[in-house]
Image: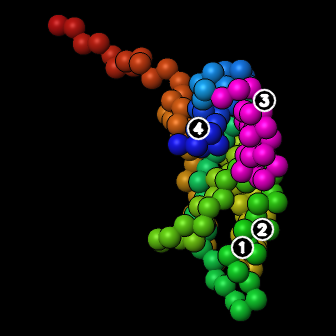
Amino acid sequence: MDLSEELLELLQENARYSTDDLARMTDADPETVEAEIERLESEGIIRGYQAVVDFEETERERVRAIVELNVTLDRETSYGDIAERIVQFPEVQELRLVSGDYDFDMEVEGDSMREVSHFISDKIAPIPEITQTVTHYHMDTYKTRGIVLGDHDEDDRLSVSP
């Protein structure tokens, strides 16, 4: 594995590793690590750094939904054209072109189910190429982006005693 692959793997594990930490873990000098990260960022390989937030542990309630989208293409419209329009909405957290029963897998976030529903019915469904939307609301998240969320060690079952 070359240095860039090692750095990408380590940064995906923890983007808060310092340059010195990364240098120590890859047996490279800090200047080389810093230059490589700058190269990866300037070439668009590293697009950003984000925290993984467990909203169950906060006061803020967030609603997430997965929306399946079916589209019909015409001669002048491609999947890329449709995706380019959809990703402009800040409510859209993730959008993927997929194979199978539907065309796009879209993840949407909002402050309430009403807000998410209105976004889908007012902004997404009216796009002419979109022929069907199916919305699945997240009820609970146990793992995201490779990180286990919450404290799921609790046993909520009632104890039965004779």
- Note whether 28 is above or below 101 in the view shown: above
Question: For the point 76% across and 60% down, which residue is it?
Answer: 87
Q: Which mark is residue 31?
A: 3
Q: Amino acid at mark 4?
A: Glu
Residue of label 1: 80
Q: Amino acid at mark 3?
A: Glu
Q: Callout 3: helix, strand or loop?
A: helix
In the image, residue 26 lies at what x, y percent? 60, 29
Name the N-terminal-most of marks 3 and 1.
3
For this orientation, the residue located farthest to the left is 162
Q: Callout 4: helix, strand or loop?
A: helix
90 on left or right of 20: right
Name the N-terminal-most of marks 2 and 4.
4
Quadrant of the rendering where the C terminus is positioned: top left
Q: Amino acid at mark 2?
A: Glu
Q: Is residue 64 visible?
A: yes
Residue of label 2: 84
For this orientation, the residue located farthest to the top is 162
Q: Nearer the viewer, mark 2 or mark 4?
A: 4
Give the magenta-colored segment's residue range: 28-55
Q: Nearer the viewer, residue 53 or 157?
A: 53
